[in-house]
Image (cartoon, grey):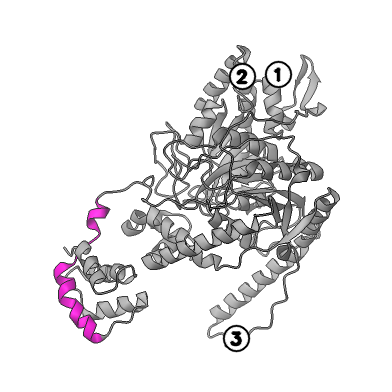
């Protein structure tokens, strides 16, 4: 067998270290039966690696490469699980970053309990469960604390709704019914005995099924992992258990944290069940919006809290990178993964964050920052910016160069379809501008002085190469073994093809992208020098930019499209173009300083209270 270690070393000695060439050449030799490396192999590998090697040098390399070739086999034989992180740690902190490290008591708002939450029956005052299903965590906490509603009753209510609506929404991987009822019973006993743990005590919740939960399957939403058992509880699961919260379900995610397609189908948007819920926190957003859980935990690497929160009309929090430990969660990207709550209100996000943040001694990327929620914080003292260019109409596209005539009917059909989709997206963007304009008007009406800001001009997509390379490394065995064919989604933008393509990323270019990322972080630090919160549309370049820099974001509903909204060009729930349309939610995003969640959430809550869009919920009775 060819041995790759010495082979790579010899490539390094010839001046080709850190390029793509050694990996490609090794793969070609393996494909050729691992007999002998030829000059032709070196030539084709060099072309892919964009390295010029003369015929003379190719001839010179042959003897050494064939004599000293060594493989990656020794590393492969270690069979590293997904939980093993590389000896490289990303830290979003720049020299100017400051954060609190001293924890203070949480200060919640006064609970507001509408009269309709309780109704009179033959036995006197009793809970109105159809309405309570959509109550906030803050409201449910008060009802449980004052013993007006039991944790067992809430748990049974949510379990019943999960069973009733999951056939339509396809948002549940596993019900944790036995665990939940035992937790709820214990919560009621403790509260009756005066041992109240806090606002999450007795509150039912759902976990994105990339969080390990002892005794239950953790499937990562992926074909080939349907029976996977991980014999531990993720740190966030442990912390929510300690807070007294009740886990009722493991909720869906797109396979290996991409999109809303999982091995059991496509998770649906409760506002329009002909649409997918977006992803990858597909189940958490769908279940929370539909009143099937009080709150949920999702994850984001590049939009996986933001996108489904937008589609499903939830309030989502993507915390600062390093605030919430990821121990026990599936890894997609060691330098970009983040865990955060998906809720019905901003304050709910604050209450959940208070329970799950902080170093755990295992996730080395976690920083010792403190989160101090104060619902009475004077948000009017905050300095607020807005990404002005993102709120302005998109410039009309200049007429491009004339295309060559299509060579086949299939190519002509593809071009027409692409044109149709572009026009539909532009029509939706034009229609949705009214909601963004209304948001700026409402903020100014609230007395907010909006300062225009610009995001740093960087090649975000090129830096995103880090995510592609890290995700391919996290699931390298899946690619090499051919088990990637078990994943349900197999389009050109899905993981199987992305992972295969990622093997052609040179190591040098990964490092160069990391260096560019450092420059981007420094430039974003300058943007926040005199700004506490930034208002922006939820889509666009800011999403990639802030996921790369690690800044926190709150995504909240910002109005609902009327009957005049352009209809989607497709009704296929698995089609990205099937979004928007009459009756569906729009969203707005607020960005904060690194570890500035307390200010960020206080400001976002003020806007949410002033608008009330979070109070509307989908009707699923006829679904």
Question: 568 above or below 291?
Answer: below
- Residue displayed at 41% across by 33% down: 232
Q: Secondary structure at mark 3?
A: loop
* Residue tagged 1: 146
- Residue displayed at 72% across by 48% down: 557
The residue nearer to you, when weighing 446 against 439, is 446
Task: Give yes or no for residue 57 being in the magenta stretch.
Answer: yes
| Left or right of residue 330, residue 20 in this image | left
Q: Quadrant of the N terminus?
A: bottom left
Residue 390, by quadrant, is bottom right
The residue nearer to you, when weighing 28 against 251, is 28
Classed neighbour count for the residue bearing mark 3: other residues with Cα under 10 Å, few (<14), some (14–19), many (≥20): few
Q: Which mark is residue 233?
A: none
Magenta-colored segment: predominant secondary structure: helix
Magenta stretch, residue numbers = 55-77
* Residue tagged 2: 196
* Residue tagged 3: 403
Residue 221 rendering spot, x and y as whole percentages? 48, 47
Q: Secondary structure at mark 1?
A: loop
Q: Do the numbered discs 2 and 3 sit on residues whose CB atoms are within 8 Å? A: no
Question: 2 above or below 395?
Answer: above
Q: Secondary structure at mark 2?
A: loop
Residue 313 rendering spot, x and y as whole percentages? 69, 47
């Amino acid at each position: 067998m060819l041995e790759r270690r010495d082979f790579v070393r010899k490539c390094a000695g010839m001046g080709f270290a850190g390029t793509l060439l050694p990996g490609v050449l090794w793969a070609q030799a393996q494909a050729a039966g691992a007999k002998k490396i030829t000059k032709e192999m070196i030539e084709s590998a060099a072309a892919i690696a964009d390295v010029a090697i003369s015929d003379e040098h190719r001839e010179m390399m042959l003897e050494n490469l064939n004599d000293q070739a060594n493989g990656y086999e020794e590393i492969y034989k270690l069979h590293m699980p997904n939980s093993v992180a590389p000896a490289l740690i990303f830290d979003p902190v720049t020299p100017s970053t400051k954060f609190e490290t001293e924890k203070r008591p949480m200060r919640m708002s006064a609970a507001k309990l509408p009269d309709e939450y309780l109704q009179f029956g033959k036995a006197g005052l009793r809970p109105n469960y159809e309405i309570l299903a959509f109550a906030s965590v803050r409201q449910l906490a008060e009802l449980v604390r004052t013993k007006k509603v039991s944790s067992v009753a809430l748990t049974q209510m949510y379990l019943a709704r999960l069973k009733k609506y999951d056939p339509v929404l396809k948002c549940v991987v596993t019900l944790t019914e036995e665990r939940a009822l035992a937790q709820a019973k214990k919560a009621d006993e403790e509260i009756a005995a005066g041992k109240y743990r806090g606002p999450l005590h007795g509150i039912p919740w759902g976990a994105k099924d990339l969080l390990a939960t002892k005794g239950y399957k953790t499937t990562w939403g992926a074909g080939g992992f349907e029976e996977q058992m991980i014999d531990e509880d993720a740190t966030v699961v442990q912390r929510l258990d300690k807070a007294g919260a009740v886990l009722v379900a493991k909720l869906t995610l797109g396979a290996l944290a991409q999109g809303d397609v999982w091995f059991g189908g496509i998770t649906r948007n409760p506002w329009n069940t002909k649409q997918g819920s977006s992803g990858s926190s597909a189940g958490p957003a769908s279940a929370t919006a539909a009143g099937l859980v009080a709150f949920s935990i999702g994850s984001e690497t590049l939009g996986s809290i933001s996108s489904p929160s937008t589609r499903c009309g939830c309030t989502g929090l993507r915390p600062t990178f390093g605030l919430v430990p990821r121990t026990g969660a599936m890894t997609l990207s060691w330098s970009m993964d983040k865990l955060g709550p998906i809720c019905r209100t901003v304050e709910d996000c604050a209450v959940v964050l208070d329970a799950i943040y902080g170093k755990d001694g295992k996730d080395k990327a976690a920083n010792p920052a403190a989160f101090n929620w104060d619902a009475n914080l004077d948000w009017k003292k905050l300095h607020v910016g807005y990404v002005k260019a993102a709120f302005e109409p998109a410039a009309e596209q200049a007429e491009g160069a004339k295309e060559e005539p299509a060579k086949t009917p299939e190519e002509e059909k593809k071009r027409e379809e692409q044109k149709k989709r572009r026009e539909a997206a532009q029509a939706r963007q034009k229609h949705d501008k009214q909601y963004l304009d209304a948001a700026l008007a409402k903020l100014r009406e609230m007395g907010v002085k909006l300062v225009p800001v610009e995001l740093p001009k960087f090649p975000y997509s090129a830096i995103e190469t880090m995510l592609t390379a890290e995700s391919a490394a996290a699931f390298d065995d899946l690619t090499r073994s051919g088990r990637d064919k078990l994943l349900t989604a197999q389009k050109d933008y899905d993981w199987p093809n992305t992972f295969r393509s990622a093997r052609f990323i040179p190591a040098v270019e990964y490092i160069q992208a990391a260096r560019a990322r450092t420059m981007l972080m420094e430039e974003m630090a300058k943007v926040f020098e005199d700004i506490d919160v930034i208002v922006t549309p939820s889509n666009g370049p800011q999403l990639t930019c802030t996921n790369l820099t690690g800044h926190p974001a709150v995504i909240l509903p910002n109005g609902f499209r009327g009957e005049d909204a352009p209809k989607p060009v497709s009704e296929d729930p698995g089609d990205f173009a099937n979004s928007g349309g009459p009756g569906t939610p729009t969203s707005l995003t607020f960005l904060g300083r690194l570890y500035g969640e307390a200010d960020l959430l206080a400001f976002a809550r003020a806007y949410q209270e002033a608008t009330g869009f979070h109070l509307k919920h989908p009707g699923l009775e006829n679904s």
